[in-house]
Image (cartoon, rainbow, N blue to C red):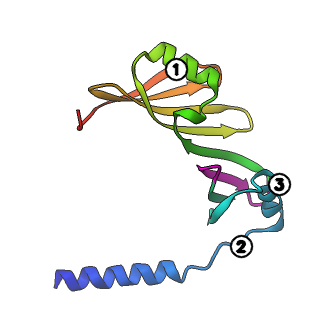
């Protein structure tokens, strides 16, 4: 009986998602997107009340771009990448301050006024979530015990 309920719930979920209408992207949003991200591949759109999010890959980097629905302006971009895509000056500051820790992943959050980097670094026993601002200032946010160590 439980298996039947799970099957029916899964089938309904798939049906609802598959039949959800695609968001309507207005011309201002599309123009902004095409000017800034002209080489974007595999774009999918997510609609919110006041903005549209474009999720795509460009130059092997995963992006989330938030655009204003009304005027099409770019509100925020989030990029996910590895150590090699960090700006060299920040990479130097991080390596200098953190020593032997390895950079596991980077989440770059950019708005019109600021850029922050949420970075996960590893050492032999722990993972650390740090914030690095555009000036190279490092703030430790969390420490996690590695399960693979």
Position of the N terminus by quadrant = bottom left
The answer to whether marks 1 and 3 mark residues whose Cβ atoms lie closer than 8 Å is no
Residue 67 colored in magenta in the image? yes
User: Looking at the picture, how far across and down is residue 18, in whole percent?
Assistant: 51, 81
The residue wearing badge 3 is 35
Distance from the alpha carbon under mark 2 to that under mark 1: 42 Å
Residue appearing at x 33%, y 80% in the figure: 9
Q: Reading the chain from its start, which is encountered first: label 3 or label 2?
A: 2
The residue wearing badge 2 is 24
Examine the residues drawn in magenta and state their main secondary structure: strand
Classify residue 112 by image quadrant. Answer: top right
The span picked out in magenta is 58-72
User: Looking at the picture, how far across and down is residue 34, in whole percent?
Assistant: 79, 59
The residue wearing badge 1 is 94
Q: Reading the chain from its start, which is encountered first: label 1 or label 3?
A: 3
User: Looking at the picture, how far across and down is residue 132, in whole percent?
Assistant: 55, 25
The residue lying toward the viewer, choosing from 107 and 72, is 107
Residue appearing at x 60%, y 19% in the figure: 136
Distance from the alpha carbon under mark 3 to that under mark 2: 19 Å
134 displayed left or right of 99 = right
Numbered label attached to residue 74: none
Q: Secondary structure at mark 3?
A: helix
Q: Is residue 82 above or below residue 38?
A: above
Distance from the alpha carbon under mark 1 to that under mark 3: 33 Å
Q: Residue furthest left?
A: 1
């Amino acid at each position: 009986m439980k298996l039947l309920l799970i099957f029916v719930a899964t089938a309904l979920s798939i049906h609802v998602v598959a039949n959800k209408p695609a968001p309507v992207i207005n011309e201002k949003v599309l123009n902004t997107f095409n000017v800034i991200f002209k080489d974007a591949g595999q774009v999918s759109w997510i609609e919110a009340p006041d903005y549209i999010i474009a999720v795509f890959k460009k130059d092997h980097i995963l992006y989330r771009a938030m655009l204003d629905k009304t005027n099409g302006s770019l509100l925020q971009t989030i990029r996910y990448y590895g150590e090699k895509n960090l700006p060299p000056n920040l990479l130097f500051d991080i390596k200098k301050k953190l020593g032997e820790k390895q950079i596991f992943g980077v989440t770059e959050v950019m708005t019109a006024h600021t850029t922050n980097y949420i970075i996960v670094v590893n050492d032999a026993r722990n993972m650390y979530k740090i914030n690095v601002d555009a000036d190279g200032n490092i703030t430790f946010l969390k420490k996690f015990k590695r399960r693979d160590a």
